[in-house]
Image (tube, rainbow, N blue to C red):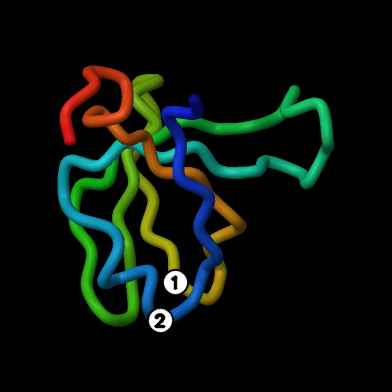
Amino acid sequence: MSNMLMERPTATAALLLRAGDVIEIDGDGSIDGSNDVTALVLLVNDEFVILDRCDESTPCVLSLDELAPFRRFDAAAVLGIA
């Protein structure tokens, strides 16, 4: 059972993302995931998302069109909550 939901970066991503979500972004498209980045969604609207990589760097603002394919952490799957 996977605890990540794979999403494509489209305008509907704004409907799927909420402030507080934890996502994993493909850093360079590598298959092994060695350059994946985990980030906390601070804010999201119909056009932009503000992400905090929680690595003491400045949060970044991305257009939803710029957002690479991402996986959203699904806590309910991990905790077994329906």
Of 31 and 64, the residue lying toward us: 31
- For image coordinates 45% across by 45% down, the residue present is 5
Q: Position of residue 59 (x, y in %)?
A: 33, 42
Helix, strand, or loop for circle 1? Answer: loop
Question: Which quarter of the figure has residue 77?
Answer: top left
Question: Which quarter of the figure has residue 47?
Answer: bottom left
Residue sitting at the far right: 31
Helix, strand, or loop for circle 2? Answer: loop
Q: Position of residue 9 (x, y in %)?
A: 52, 68
Q: Is residue 72 above or below residue 67?
A: above
Lateral position of residue 74 relative to residue 63, left or right: left
Which residue in the structure is indicated by mark 2?
11
- For image coordinates 53% across by 76% down, the residue present is 65
Q: Is residue 39 above or below residue 48?
A: above
Q: Position of residue 23 (x, y in %)?
A: 41, 40
Give the residue type at disc 2.
Ala
Q: Position of residue 57 (x, y in %)?
A: 39, 29
- For image coordinates 19% across by 55% down, the residue present is 18
Residue sitting at the far front: 82
Quick check: marks 2 and 1 in contact, CB under 8 Å?
yes
Q: Which mark is residue 64?
A: 1
